[in-house]
Structures are given as C-alpha cells and as structure tokens.
Amino acid sequence: MKKFLVSFLCCLPICLYAQHVHQVTAQTTRMSEDTLKKRFRLKPGDLFTPQAYQKAQEDLHKLRVFKTLEFIEKERKHGVDIHIKADDRSYVFPMAFAMSGKKRSAGLSLASGNLFKQGETIFLFAGGGRDGFATHGGLSLGNDFFYLGYQHLNFEQSFYENRWTSVPSIFSAADDKDKHLSSRIGKIHGRQDTLQFTYRHKFSSVWSFSVTPEYEYYYYKDGALDSGKHSHISLAMQYADDIRPDLNMGALSGIGLSDKAQALRNLPQVRMGKLAEISYTAGGHWSGSEYDIQKLSLGAGLLWELKTRHMLALYAKAQRAFSAPFSNRIESSDLLFGLGIYDREQRGKGGVSGGVSFTYFILRNQLGLLSFTPFYEVAYITSDGNSYLPHSGVGATLTYRLWRFPLPISVNFTQNVDDGTQHIGVKLGGRF
C-alpha cells in the first residue's frame, strides 16, 4: 500500500500540470489556414509535450514550401494556444542531370511545389542513355502519394564464371563489356518494358502502406530464358521515425529553408532515426503473368545523427523468392543500398545483406554542405544449392550540395571486394 501511495504521489504533479492543446490558429500567404492546420500534427485536445510539439513543427518544415515558419504558444486556463505564422510560396523548377562513366546518360525533370496552394509537390522526369529511356511522374499531397512510370530497356544479359551476371540498367556508371571478357561464358540480347503505378498512404506519423501493380514484359532472343509477361502486385508496410528528407527543388529561391538556421546549429543530444519495411510481391495467371512469382522482403535501418550533425547509418535487408523465374530472382544489387557502383551481381532464391556508412561534414555553412562518406556493404545470395554467393563493396563518396538543393556534385570510388574490380564515377544530380 505504501509503495502504491508513493507512486501515486510521484505521478500526481505530472497529472496536475499536464497540458492539452486548446486551439490551433494559423496565418498563411497562399494556402488556406484550414489546409495548414490539417498538415499540423497537434490538434485541439491532444496532449501538449515538448517532444510532440517539436515533431509537429518538423512535419510542416518537411513540406519544403515555406520561406519562414513561426510558432507562437500561449498558456491559457484551459490549455495551450498555438499560433502558426507561415510565409508559404510556390515554385516551378526544371533541372537536368548527367552521369559519366562507361555508360553515359542524361535526363530532364520538372518539379513544382505548392502550385495549387495545398502544400503539394509534383515531379515529372524523362531521361535515357545508350540502352533505353524512362519517364515517370509523381504527386505528393498530404498523407497520399501517387506515382506512374514507364521504362524501356535494351540490354545484353551476360553470364560469367562463379555465377556472376551483368546488371542491365539505363542509368548506370559502369559497363561490364570490357572488364570481364575472359570470364564470360555466354550472353543473350534482351528487352524489358515496365509500366508501374504506386499508391502510398501515410495513416499515422510513422506508419505508411503502399500498393504497386506493375506490368512487366521480358523478351529474350529466340524465346530463351523467361521471355513473356511477368506482371505482379506488391504490397508494403513501412515504419519511419526521424528519417528526414533533405532535398527540395525550390531551395535556390529560398523556399523550403524555413528550418535552415536550426539545421545549422548543433544538436543538444544525439538523435536516432529508425526505418523498417516489409513487402510482399505476387504474380500469376490472375495478374496477367505467364510465371508464378512470390517474393518477401524485409528491411531495416538505424541512423544516428551526432551533436555535430555527422551521421552514422546501419542497414540490413533480407529477401526470399518462394517462386520466381530468372528475371525475377533475388539480386544482390537490389539487396545492397545504393552506396557503391557495380557492373556485376549475383542472383538466387534468397539473400541477406548489411551495410554501414558514416557521413562527415567537412563544411557546413550558409551556402551548402561538403561531405565525405566512407561505406561498406555486403550481400549473400543463396544459390541453387546450399552455398552462399557473396557480393560486397567498400568505398567512399565526396559530395558538395547547396542547401537541400538536389543537384549534388559527387565523386564515388567503389572497390568490389569479391571480384576485384574498381569503379570511379562522377555525378551531377540524380543518383549513381
């Protein structure tokens, strides 16, 4: 009884002084006040805590359509009043990118933000290279995201000793045609056409769900391998907490930098972000596929942002194909995390992977960010037998980027630990 009484008395001050949100008001430039309040996480009646208040502010900053955001809170008898003063603007921005290497490619994108006064972002893209072209577009509006894309790819699928295969891709800085001739045991010409639609809905501050129907067609010369339709549907559930987007097309005109001053300051303590995802892919006659396809994927990541803003990231992933033809098997390049450049991969029925990177900001000032990111990533693919086929890489990326503007200038070096090849790639915008 005494222990219960002590616990009750300790909790009593918290209960007495816990405050709730009384009302939320807003002052805007373009979007309606109701739209802004809808995007703000805290609602009248919610418990008011410093942590919840901070995350609600960050949600608005992440829209990246504000020149300034000011939050004013006043304690009232019945709770806390919050007033938001927002200078929201709009932008329409074209951007080109190019990638060097053995396989050069280029593209052009057009992005807009808050054009329709809803805090929305829209992007369109078209680009290609020697092996094909791709075009896609997307709309992000509140808790909903829509994507539609089409890709046409011509390629030579090569096979090598030790079960290595080439990596067909339009936007790739590497080419396998010259480096591995001595170990190539065969090749075949192929063509891939893919039409994909994705709808994602965020139903809480950290949870989201997506569905992706995809039409996919492969043609291999003389009907070899798994020529035909591979249409399938993917369902995914994602958990993301404190994983913050840092890009914004309107940054050059000052839009989307409402938290820049805050982002330049050191953190009061180490901050950790968490990411987890599970997805299931299925296809068969019911989806228009000529092959049975069933795959399960699990992924997770942890990000530690140090007080000085340097970032340590850990990644892990596992995939399993319960039934899949050659073109839909698990690929080591998909298990890896986009940190390195590779021209060959392993394929199999399943695999696991892990990776680590550390981003050190050499410069962090009002103009932009200069960062150096060493990394290591490794994947193990199960072959048709019981053995595991490794694919690992170690390297580093040196990047300079204007504040949150997605036009980085980067140099990447990757050493493939398992086949001994090295790659140096330069990028202007886009990804490696």
Image (cartoon, rainbow, N blue to C red):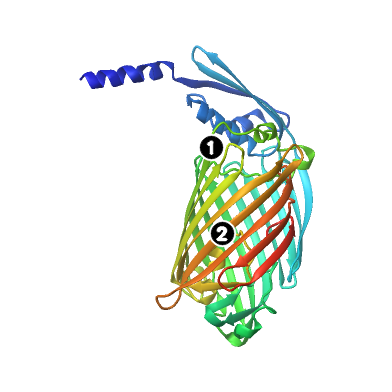
Q: Is residue 248 above or below residue 260?
A: below
Image height of 291 relative to 182, above or below:
above
- State the quadrant of the C terminus: bottom right
SS under mark 2: strand
Distance in Å between CA atoms under marks 2 and 1: 23 Å
Q: Quadrant of residue 394?
A: bottom right
Q: Residue at x 48, y 68 (%)?
A: 380
Horizontal side, residue 84 vs residue 209: left or right? right
Residue 304 horizontal/vertical position (percent): 54, 43
Q: Left or right: where does residue 417 sit relative to residue 29?
A: left
Q: Residue furthest left?
A: 1
Q: Is residue 268 above or below residue 273?
A: above
Q: Position of residue 204 (x, y in %)?
A: 49, 40
Q: Residue at x 51, y 24 (%)?
A: 44
Q: Position of residue 354 (x, y in %)?
A: 50, 59
Q: Foreground residue, 266 or 151?
A: 266
* Left or right: 127, with 78 as reference point: right
Residue, disc 2? 376
Front residue of this view, candidates 73 and 401: 401
Element type at mark 1: loop
Q: Earlier in the sequence, mark 2 or mark 1?
A: 1
**Amino acid beneath label 2:** Tyr
Which of the numbered marks, if any, corresponds to residue 270?
1
Which residue: 68% across, 48% down?
Answer: 371
